Image (spheres, rainbow, N blue to C red):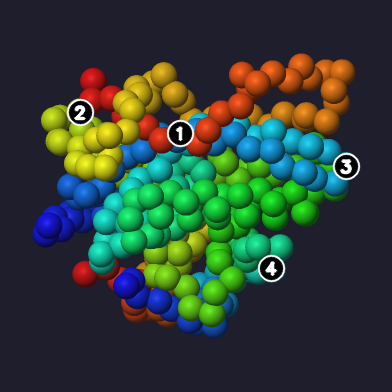
């Protein structure tokens, strides 16, 4: 399929706004990370763009905004993106001497914005809401209103058994969603 | 395959376009700081894919014209 990208100037920057192969994604990750004397649970509700470029699929982080990974298929790009995310969590754990320092750095990592990527995500969402068709395999993903799933990260200390009541219902798989059209 | 850029060329771009930057290798990824911002996702590869470098430039708010002058492959056509 021929790529139809559009560029427009914002200030002095040229922004690749989107093309018909740009897909906005919502995702949820829930992971446990060991640190120096603590165990932390990280639950993230994030946003990303998936785009085909030069015969590769690229997953661009919007929140968190500092990850980008590629694959020969969207599924490979998901996995590589998640692996990079986990590597960053492990790096932060290695550099944090306390749970509080770990939590603070995770939050800084998550909330550091990439305004250009955020704009592309919003433009892509508007295109879907204007009726742009979502192609396979993204059309198979569950739909969710972005308003019902705001970007967020929660970092919880888990190693204090007295303060935590662990339940099987706490477990969650990685999940990906396409925004609802309306 | 996407275009790649040697890691050393990216470091040279940082020296010219991101005065005061720091770079260190953590356990898995390189961590680059500049402008009060932190980029943690730089892979430990000899050659970096172009979109990793573009993301680095955007995330650290490095002057794009300067980065493209140092690394012409970054320009989008």
| Dot 4 and dot 3 within a common chain | no
Labels 1, 2: front one? 1
- Which mark is in front, 2 or 3? 3
In the rendered image, which residue does mark 1 sit on? A175
C-alpha span from label 4 to label 2: 42 Å
Tags 1 and 2 in contact by the CB under 8 Å rule? Answer: no
Rate crowding at label 2 as few (under 14), some (14 to 19) or many (20 or more) other CA atoms within 10 Å. Answer: some
- First-in-chain label (2 vs 3): 3
- Which mark, by number, is residue B25? 4
Judge whether A50 appears above or below B30 on screen.
above
Tag 1 secondary structure: strand
Q: Is residue B23 left or right of residue B47?
A: right
**Chain of the residue where label 4 is placed in the rendered structure:** B
Residue beneath the point at 60% across and 57% down: B40
* Mark 1, other Cα within 10 Å: few <14 / some 14–19 / many ≥20: few
Q: CA distance from mark 1 to mark 2?
A: 22 Å
Which badge, 1 or 3, is on the more N-terminal residue?
3
Name the residue carrying label 2: A129
Same chain assignment for discs 1 and 2: yes
Residue for point 63% across, 66% down: B30
Quarter occupied by the C terminus of chain A: top left
**Quarter-wise, where is residue A155 in the image?**
top right
Q: Secondary structure at mark 4?
A: strand
Q: Earlier in the sequence, mark 1 or mark 2?
A: 2
* Mark 2 secondary-structure assignment: helix
Q: Residue drawn at (22%, 42%), measured in percent from left and top?
A: A136
């Amino acid at each position: 399929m021929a790529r139809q990208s559009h560029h427009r100037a914002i200030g002095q920057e040229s922004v690749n706004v989107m093309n018909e192969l740009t897909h906005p994604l919502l995702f949820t990750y829930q992971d446990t990370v060991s640190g120096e004397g603590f165990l932390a649970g990280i639950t993230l509700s994030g946003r990303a763009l998936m785009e085909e470029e030069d015969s590769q699929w690229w997953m661009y982080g919007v929140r968190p905004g500092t990850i980008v990974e590629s694959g020969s298929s969207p599924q490979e790009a998901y996995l590589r993106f998640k692996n990079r995310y986990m590597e960053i969590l492990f790096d932060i754990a290695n550099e944090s001497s306390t749970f509080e320092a770990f939590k603070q750095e995770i939050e800084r990592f998550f909330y550091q914005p990439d305004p250009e990527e955020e704009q592309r995500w919003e433009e892509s969402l508007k295109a879907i809401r204007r009726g742009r068709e979502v192609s396979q395999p993204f059309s198979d993903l569950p739909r969710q209103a972005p308003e019902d799933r705001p970007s967020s990260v929660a970092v919880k200390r888990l190693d204090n058994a007295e303060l935590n009541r662990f339940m099987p219902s706490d477990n969650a798989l990685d999940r990906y969603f396409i925004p609802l059209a309306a | 395959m996407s275009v790649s850029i040697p890691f050393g060329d990216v470091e040279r771009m940082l020296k010219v376009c991101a005065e005061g930057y720091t770079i260190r290798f953590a356990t898995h990824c390189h961590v680059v700081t500049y402008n009060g911002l932190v980029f943690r996702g730089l892979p430990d590869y000899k050659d970096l894919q172009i979109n990793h470098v573009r993301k680095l430039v955007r995330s650290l708010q490095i002057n794009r014209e300067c980065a493209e002058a140092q690394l012409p492959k970054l320009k989008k056509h």
